[in-house]
Image (spheres, rainbow, N blue to C red):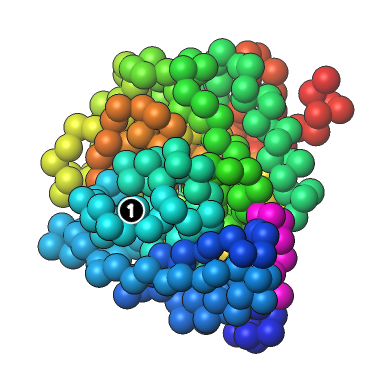
Amino acid sequence: MPVSDADMVRAWTHVLSLSKLQPKQTVTILTSQTTHPQTLSTAIIAASNLGATVNRLDLSPVNAEFAHSRDSLAYLGTTPLTGNRPAIAALKESDLVLDLMTLLFSPEQAEILESGTKILLAVEPPEVLVRLLPSLEDKARVGESAALLQGAREMRVTSKAGTDLHLPMGEFPVIQEYGFVDEPGRWDHWPSGFSLTFPNEGQASGRVVLDRGDILLPMKTYINTPIEMIVEKGYVTSIKGDVDADLLNDYMGSFDDREAYAISHIGWGQQKRARWSTLGLYDREQTIGMDARAFEGNFLFSMGPNNEAGGSRTTACHIDIPMRNCTVLLDGQEVVREGKVVSLKQAA
Ligand SMILES: O=c1ccc(O)c[nH]1
C-alpha cells in the first residue's frame, strides 16, 4: 500500500535516532537513477529535522552493458564509486552515508567504513521499509544468533529434501543485520533481521537440495522443481535438476566466472515481521526481496563473493537462496529445526 510522506518521515526519524544521528553531524545521501524519490525526499527532511547537515551525492549508474538484471544486488563489485576518488573522499568525511544506490560487496564500501563513517543501505520501496521498521528487539534477536555463530566451529544444515551441508567456520567475522547503524564504522541494511558469516575458505562440502518453494534471488522465483547442488572444497561443482536448474545455470554461466560458484554467506532469518510468501505479492522489479532473505527460520545460503567479510574473493555474480524447512546445527546444537528457530531456552 502507498506510504504517506508523514509516515515515511517518521520512519526515517525512528531509524536515524536508533542510528544515534546527532545535531551538526554530516549525512551524505548516495543516490542514483533508481533511487526512490519518496525515500530520498523524506530522508532529507528527517535528517535535517534532527539538525544534521544533509548532502546529496548523485552518481551515474554503471554496468548496464554487463548486467542481465536491474536488481541492484545482481551485479556486484564495481559501482559508480569505483575509481571515483572525489566522491569517496566526500563519503569518508561524512558521519553517516544513507546508501540509496547499493554499494554492497564493493571495495569502496569497506574503505569508507574503515574511516569510521557509518553506512545504512535502504533501497527497498517505502512500503517495505515502513512495514519492516527496525527495532531494539530486532537488534537483540539478531544479537542472539550472532552470539551463537561467534563461537561455532562448524555449521551443518540438513533437510528432509536431502540437504546435508558441512560448513566449517571461524575464519570470518559474523555480520549482524538489524536495520540501523549505531556504532562508528558500522554497515547495516534497512530492512533486514538476520546474522550471517562465511564458511572457511575452501572447506564447505556436501549436498544442497533446493525444494519446491525455496527462493532464488535476484531471480525472485519460488522454484517448482528440486535443484541438487554438490559442494566440494568451498565451491558448488554441479547444479542439476529440471527447468529451474537450467535457468540458474544459464544465468550464472553469463558471468563466465568460477568464483560465482563459491559458497558465500550463510545464516538464518530472525525477522518475525517478514514472511516467505511476501515476495510473491510484488512485481519482480519492485523489490530486492528482503522479506525472503529475512523471514524467521529460513536458512539463507548464497554463492559468490566473500570480500564483504574481508575475504579475497570477488565476483560480480551473487545468488541468495533462502531455503525453507531446514535444520541448522552449530557444533551439533540445533538452532533452527525444520524451518523453525529453536528458542534459546530450548537450545540451552
Ligand atoms: O542485506 C543483505 C542483502 C543481500 C545479501 O546478500 C546480504 N545481506
In-front residue for pair 293/97: 97
In-front residue for pair 281/241: 281
Quarter of image, res 65? bottom left
Q: Secondary structure at mark 1?
A: helix
The image shows residue 3 at horizontal and vertical percentages of: 63, 82
Q: Residue 156: which quarter of the image?
A: top right
Q: At 41% from the left edge and 56% from the top edge, which residue is drawn?
A: 91
Q: Residue at x 44, y 38 (%)?
A: 114
Observer able to see residue 145: yes
Residue 304 in sight here: no
Rendering coords of residue 303 (x, y %): 36, 37
Residue with the most extreme front position: 24
The answer to whether residue 322 is above or below residue 160 is: below
Residue indicated by mark 1 = 88
Query: If the image is split into quadrants, where does the C terminus sit?
Result: top right
Residue at x 50% of width, y 48% of height: 117
| Above-or-below relation of 123 to 229 | below
* Region rendered in magenta: 10-20
Label 1 C-beta lies within 8 Å of the nearest ligand 1 atom: no
